[in-house]
Image (spheres, rainbow, N blue to C red):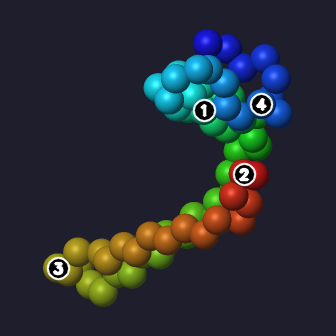
Amino acid sequence: MRVTDISKEYAGGSDDLKKLYHLIWERVVASQMADANTLRTRITAGVGKDVPDFHANGSRVLFDGC
């Protein structure tokens, strides 16, 4: 099966074929989307020579890719 008309979400006669086509349709649409943009932050805190550094990581979605 191939998606030839993006406006047609479902095709096929049986329920299994409709589900398969819809799965393929979702992948085709997702492949056309822009990449998501995230902001990643890493904070490192050091206390002393004998104590290991503490690291904290965080991320925030700036653009979800739609």
Q: Secondary structure at mark 4?
A: loop
User: From mark 1 to mark 3, how far is it between C-alphas?
Assistant: 58 Å
Q: Do we see residue 40 in this rendering?
A: yes
Residue beneath the point at 60% across and 32% down: 22
Q: Nearer the viewer, mark 1 or mark 3?
A: 1
Judge whether 50 appears above or below 40 on screen.
below
- The residue wearing badge 2 is 65
What's the residue type where badge 2 is placed?
Gly
User: From mark 1 to mark 4, how far is it between C-alphas?
Assistant: 9 Å
User: From mark 2 to mark 1, how far is it between C-alphas?
Assistant: 20 Å
Whichever of callouts 3 and 2 sits on the residue coming sooner in the sequence is 3
Whichever of callouts 4 and 3 sits on the residue coming sooner in the sequence is 4
Tag shown at residue 22: 1
Q: Nearer the viewer, residue 27 or 61?
A: 27
- The residue wearing badge 3 is 50
Residue 7 locus on image (x, y percent): 82, 33
Tag shown at residue 8: 4
- Residue lying at the far top in this picture: please name it: 1
User: From mark 4 to mark 3, how far is it between C-alphas?
Assistant: 64 Å
User: From mark 4 to mark 2, how far is it between C-alphas?
Assistant: 22 Å
Neighbor class of circle 4 (other Cα within 10 Å; few <14, some 14-19, many 20+) is few
Q: Do we see residue 20 in this rendering?
A: no
Q: Nearer the viewer, residue 18 or 49?
A: 18
Judge whether 39 appears above or below 7 on screen.
below
Whichever of callouts 4 and 2 sits on the residue coming sooner in the sequence is 4
What's the residue type where badge 3 is placed?
Asp
Q: Nearer the viewer, mark 3 or mark 2?
A: 2
Residue beneath the point at 73% across and 60% down: 63
Residue beneath the point at 44% across and 70% down: 57
Q: Secondary structure at mark 3?
A: loop
Q: Nearer the viewer, mark 2 or mark 1?
A: 1
What's the residue type where badge 1 is placed?
His
